[in-house]
Amino acid sequence: MNGSLSNSPPQLAVVLLSGGLDSMVTAALAKEQGFAVHALSVDYGQRHRLELESARRIAERLCLVRHTEIALDLRAFGGSALTDTIDVPKSGVGAEIPVTYVPARNLVFLALTTACAEAAGARDVFIGVNALDYSGYPDCRPEFIASFTETARLGTKAGVEGAPFTIHAPLQHLNKADIARECQRLGLDPAWSWSCYDPTPEGQACGLCDSCRLRRKGFAEAGIVDSTRYDA
């Protein structure tokens, strides 16, 4: 008998799966690293609800071990073009934090994902934030991820008992072209994911919001065809 062989199951990780390109690539990278992936998606009342359908599709196509969807309606707070009656800007990516920023969204969602992980006995949490080609959201920065890791250590039973969480942000220092290349390398269909903040009534991506512009720019710079259908 070869003592080096192990029949132990793969280690569990919980991935925050929005349904967007970045979260899809992140989930696939977690699988590639050998984790059994439990995905968590949040229905927060977002106007681009097609991303939830995409999250379900991604979970099915990647054969994830579990996909949990919870409702937390942030429309009760508003304050964002994604959860309030504020027009989604389409004039180009600016230097200021845009009105599509949802107040404390990643802070709230990482807390939920960590709670899900602790309940499931997982100690690895994955999130698809990146700090290069993005819209300037403060909760995508490395400083935020590092700070949240310490908060999770201090604020959970697992953390205070010496089994802290590792918060993985594998796309942190990639630009959109890099992410497009990873999408292709991993054998993913870009059309499984959804990035547009303001889809048309016919279900096409608008092509003009910040998210569409950054996504299209990334695929163009990578020289890779994005199979997503755009209206403009």
Image (cartoon, grey):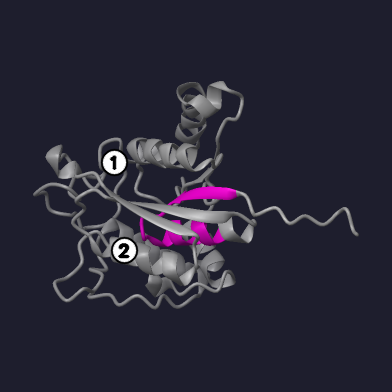
The residue segment tinted magenta is 12-29
Could you tell whether 121 is left or right of 229 in the image? Answer: right
Q: Image point 47% across, 26% down: which residue?
A: 156
| Disc 1 + disc 2, Cβ < 8 Å | no
Q: Amino acid at mark 1?
A: Glu
**Where in the figure is residue 216, as x and y percent of width and height?**
38, 68
> Mark 1 highlights which residue?
96
> Mark 2 highlights which residue?
212
Could you tell whether 209 is left or right of 117 in the image? Answer: left
Quadrant (top left/top right/bottom left/bottom right) for the N terminus: bottom right
Quadrant (top left/top right/bottom left/bottom right) for the C terminus: bottom left
Can you say whether 36 is above or below 120 in the image? below
**Where in the figure is residue 189, as x and y percent of width and height?**
45, 75
Q: Amino acid at mark 2?
A: Cys
Residue 124, image quadrant: top right
Could you tell whether 67 is left or right of 83 in the image? Answer: right
